[in-house]
Amino acid sequence: MSASTVILWFRRDLRLSDHPALWAAANAGLVIPLFIRDQSVDGLGAAAKWRLGEGLRVFGEALEDRGLKLILRRGNARDVLREVIEETGATEVHWSRLYDPEAIERDTDVKSALKEAGIVAESHPGHLIFEPWTVETQTGGPYKVYSPFWRAVKDRDVDEPLPTPDLTGPESWPDSDDLADWALGADMNRGAGVLAKYCNPGERAATSRLGSFVAQKIDAYKADRDLPAEDATSRMSEYLTYGEISPRQLWAAGARAMDAGKAGAEHYLKEVVWREFAYHLLYHFPQMLTENWREGWDDFPWREDERLAEVKAWKQGRTGVPFVDAALREMYVTGYMHNRARMIVASYLTKHCMIHWRVGQAWFDDCLTDWDPASNAMGWQWVAGCGPDAAPYFRVFNPETQGEKFDPKGTYQKRWIAEGQTSPPETATDYFEAIPRSWKMEPGGNYPREPVVGLKEGREAALAAYEARPKAS
Ligand code: FAD
């Protein structure tokens, strides 16, 4: 009897190890790896779409090393799957689950259409360690606060990550689009060449980075993770976004480090669980992507006009507040921003500048290569004060004192702000290579003499608005 043909529909799981869906496909027959460029890909921000292209390129090579081919097709997922099934005679389709509302709607629709057509259609875990519906409060229902969520999961038995299965492809392959023709970097304009210098995509790079982080940095993680000038965090976010590593692999590495007595390991696991918590919230409260999570914030006088001078200055990294500008430039150049810096720029925008968190969220969507729908929405709402388990609005980060505390020598600021330095580092000048020419900024230009919103006035105005708001929350 000839073996069945099985489609593995890859989405945000571009890896071969610890991949339950891939195991299911490999056990069922000859595997056709398929990636579909559908609306969810076209809707990605510029940097995330470019980074996806890099991930697909490297993943395609990894599959080729094993004698397989990544088939690329464009169109509505249900239609494309039908076509490929017809062309190949595939009898099964497997994929790893996603949890944002758009993906859930699409996948539910795909599953029922395939089942109706007599095809085995199965979704598998892999994007999270703890499926959102498996963590419940004692009274039933989802968690809304992080600490009890952490306590609920921290002692759970988590299975060891899976190895890569043996994979066999079909004798003849269906047609595939050419990745280069997709031009996934087209929206990046000048920035793509610069981003590429700072990007190291793929499963192999992810595994190697995780290994060196655990061997050299996890011990000091708790103390150093807040220092934006240090390379003290794992830098796994981008790999998790495209599934080039699984969260369970992070969990296993962190747990082993804990057993070995590494001081920062438990704290590391706690951070990994923040991502789980973000997805738990997104799954149960999908409106958090666009709406204030807490009641009472809809009438808050945030401004949401992209044309405002404060918005423009913030996006362009020329607010005149060096820590804020350094962070925004770091993101534009590398697609990444340090976590402490994310909190500070978000606080400055939503509090000092009184701009709606959605404006900042959208800019992060466009500029981050580790863009993640759940962590980004949760992060913005957390800082803005309207989110689940949020920092209280009246806790306004002061970028100056934050800089003194976490970047005492100004290393981070000098790394990213060229103006005023006689020989600025390449990182700082790269910014001017990446930004649109229409911004009319040059390394030798003048840095703003005054902040676009002063720290004292901004703080006072934000607190006054907070005091005056309707008190429903
Ligand atoms: P590490 O410190 O090494 O942590 C390990 C992993 O734990 C991370 O890769 C991440 O998956 C998870 N993690 C750590 N901190 C958080 C957190 N606060 N929330 C959720 N997960 C966390 N993270 C994204 O991955 N994508 C985003 O789009 C994103 N947007 C954010 C927006 C704002 C306003 C804020 C305040 C935070 C945002 N974060 C986002 C969370 C956090 O900043 C990044 O996950 C972290 O900086 C990634 O660096 P790392 O991998 O070196 O983290």
Image (tube, rainbow, N blue to C red):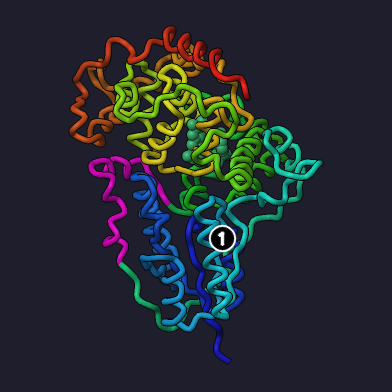
Q: Point out residue 436 in the picture as x, y percentages from the top left corner.
A: 22, 35
Residue drawn where x is 50% and y is 17% of the image: 397
Indicate the quadrant containing the C terminus: top left, top right, bottom left or bottom right: top right
Residue range highlighted in magenta: 178-201
Which three-letter amino acid code belongs to the residue tagged 1?
Ser
Residue underneath mark 1:
96
Q: Is residue 260 visible?
A: no
Q: Quadrant of residue 223?
A: top right
Q: What residue occupies the far bottom of the structure in this picture?
A: 1
The image shows residue 369, relative to residue 163, as above or below, that is above
Residue drawn where x is 44% and y is 53% of the image: 202
Q: Can residue 146 be seen in this view?
A: yes
Q: Quadrant of residue 315?
A: top left
The image shows residue 166, relative to residue 108, as above or below, that is below
Q: Point out residue 111 in the picture as x, y percentages from the top left corner.
A: 56, 68
Question: In this rendering, would 36 be left or right of 464?
Answer: left
